[in-house]
Amino acid sequence: MIKIDKAIILLYPLGLLLISFLLDNEVFMYSLLLLTSIIIYELFISQNQPYSGIRGIWLLATPSLIFVSYTVFISIPSIYIISTVNHPQALNYYLSILSFYLLFPVGLYYGNKIFPIQNTQVEKMYNMEWTLEMDHKLIYEILIIMLSIIILILCLYLIRVDTIPVFEIIRDPKVYKILFMLREESMKLLNVPRIEKYFYSWSRDLLIPLGIVSSLFLYIIDKKRKYFLLFLIYFSVGIFNNSITVAKLPIAAIFFSLMAMYLLRKRHFSFRMIIASLISIFSIPVMINYIASLPHLRTPEKLLYAIAYRLFVVPAEVLFEYFKIFPNKHPFLLGRSTQLFSWIHSDGNFNTANYVAQVWWKDRFTTGSANAVYIGNFWADFGLFGVMTVTLILGILIHYIYKQILATSHYKMDMIYVTFTTAFISHFTFSFVSSSITVIAITKGMIFIPLLLYFYRQLQKKIKNVPF
């Protein structure tokens, strides 16, 4: 396989030549800074952490997913954002974004010092076949129990909610007029204990994708009819559960996980695979956009433009709003923006995403949220110092998570590695660039990933100690 990260480093002069001819002076300068920052990142990780660069995508390595998604959805679009506005915080905005390429790899480096990864073992994984060393029957029973929990949580939700948006869409073709409020009421404004809301979210973002890819993996390894039937049940329950609130990402995440599983199995890109994957991932979001849009906006060009704009521009655009508001329209929050520090403040947590939405949309009563990548909240809290400190810590945490996946799978393409890298791929891509760290960790359940891996390791030890 071509060492793509080294190729990028060698092609750096050609990249400079191309952008100097194609871009005007201002955009050229921003592009030069970004390209140089990426090269510094690649130089830093090329020897010590090869799984952290672009090549790591073929293993769905967590650091690689973070790096690529951040570059595509935050860094590159940010050049468009700052080149079209004139604001005093534009420099801090761009410096905060570029600091990722200097501090994130440093965090990965120190993470590797504390929790070392065996690079030679990782290299061998590129050519490994999928294996399942644990008892198939035991895995099947665990998946049945987990499916029962998912269905129980789904039934509890259906009892609690007054209106289900997806049913309202089927019943009333003019529901687009109130669809936003229906979505808010179906989850965010639901009058239930907070722990119940977490149960709904963990089932949607954690258990369902894990169950879908695990059951499919079981069928791929051992072609039994009951395993395929279990996969179909998981998939059907997942599609229904993740679509009832008419949120785009949860339903797209299921297809994204399956696409990632296919990539990990085939280990190569093909034009046919890319087209099929894009159609499957974005078909539901396009359909939802069609239903939610005004009739005169339902042309194919406008729908595709809306999806592309939401995907490639909005994450960077929302982030810039945080820099425009803090500390110009509101002083720095000094820890109130996230639940990591807000408990020490007498006024408690500050709903930053909702406040930014109110200012940005000029609607002080909106319940909407302008969610942004982790930089937004830590800029709102502590400014550039907060962004730089957390980026360093983030590198250590991401390295730790990937180390746990590798250690639990014993550097093999087994069920743990395949399922944990594919089931949660949206956490480290689309969710990462559009959500705060606390939302990803707590609401979306990323905090449970190390706990689940620990549970699996303990289960392995107990099985090995059982006398036969």
Image (tube, helix red, strand yellow):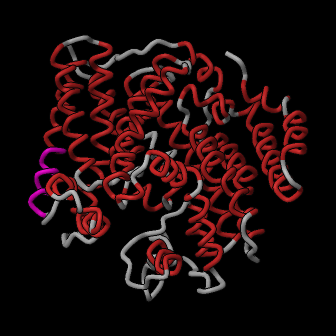
Q: Residue at x 78, y 50 (%)?
A: 34
Residue 353 place in picture, x, y as percent: 47, 71
Residue 16 place in picture, x, y as percent: 88, 41
Q: Is residue 116 left or right of residue 412?
A: right
In this view, the residue in front, 450 or 20, is: 20
Q: Is residue 159 magenta?
A: yes
In this view, the residue in front, 288 or 14, is: 288
Q: Is residue 221 above or below residue 165?
A: above
Q: Is residue 290 left or right of residue 169?
A: right
Q: Is residue 78 left or right of residue 178?
A: right
Q: Is residue 230 above or below residue 282?
A: above
The reply to whether residue 454 is in sight is no
Q: For the C terminus, which image quadrant?
A: top left
Q: Is residue 107 left or right of residue 411?
A: right
Q: Residue at x 54, y 21 (%)?
A: 271
Residue 108 place in picture, x, y as percent: 66, 44
Q: Is residue 225 above or below residue 48?
A: above
Residue 407 place in picture, x, y as percent: 49, 30
Quarter of image, res 462:
top left
Helix, strand or loop for the magenta stretch, by majority: helix
Number of numbered discs: 0
Q: For the N terminus, which image quadrant?
A: top right
What segment is highlighted magenta in the picture? 150-160
Q: Residue at x 84, y 44 (%)?
A: 22
Q: Residue at x 21, y 53 (%)?
A: 166
The reply to whether residue 429 is in sight is yes
Quarter of image, res 100:
bottom right
In this view, the residue in front, 358 or 157, is: 358
In this view, the residue in front, 11 or 451, is: 11
